[in-house]
Image (cartoon, helix red, strand yellow):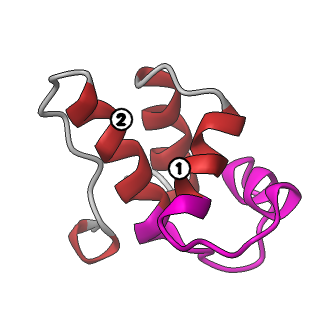
Amino acid sequence: MTAAPHAVLEAARTQAGMSFFDLWIAYFALGGTAEPDVVRAYLAGRGAHSMDYDVLAQAINERFLDQGTTYPVPYSDELS
């Protein structure tokens, strides 16, 4: 069974050592428009829609790249 998209993001955020606030700022800088409470609810599995999954994934992937890690968070079209 494949993990839910929100769980993939939350696990990657933790692995990257990002605080929620770090992720939200990076997400916002990439053009994300959801309020912090909406993003937090989505990451906790309480979101009603897919949010901006790819924008959140990009924000986390950029943190991994900054750390010199090649661990990519899959984008929505790569989730099975």
Amino acid type for the residue under numbered disc 2: Arg
Q: Residue 9 appears at what percent x and percent y?
A: 49, 47
| Residue 14 seen in the current view | yes
Tell me whether the residue at label 2 lies in contact with that at label 1, contact meaning CB atoms closer than 8 angstroms. yes
Q: Is residue 12 magenta?
A: no
Vertical arrangement, residue 26 with respect to residue 71, above or below: below
Nearer to the camera, 39 or 8: 39
Amino acid type for the residue under numbered disc 1: Ala
- Badge 1 is on which residue? 26
Number of numbered discs visible in the structure rendering: 2
Nearer to the camera, 33 or 51: 33
SS for dot 2: helix
Q: Quadrant of residue 36?
A: bottom right
Range covered by the magenta-colored residues: 28-55
| Residue 2 seen in the current view | no
Q: Is residue 54 left or right of residue 11?
A: left
Residue drawn at 36 percent across, 57 percent down: 58
Vertical arrangement, residue 49 with respect to residue 2, above or below: below
- CA gap between label 2 and label 1 equals 9 Å
Q: Residues within 10 Å of mark 1 (few under 14, many from 20)?
A: some
Residue drawn at 35 percent across, 35 percent down: 63
Q: Is residue 46 magenta?
A: yes
SS for dot 1: helix
- Badge 2 is on which residue? 63
Q: Is residue 67 left or right of residue 10?
A: left
Q: Quadrant of the C terminus?
A: bottom left
Q: Earlier in the sequence, mark 2 or mark 1?
A: 1
Q: Quadrant of residue 60?
A: top left
Residue drawn at 72 percent across, 55 percent down: 45
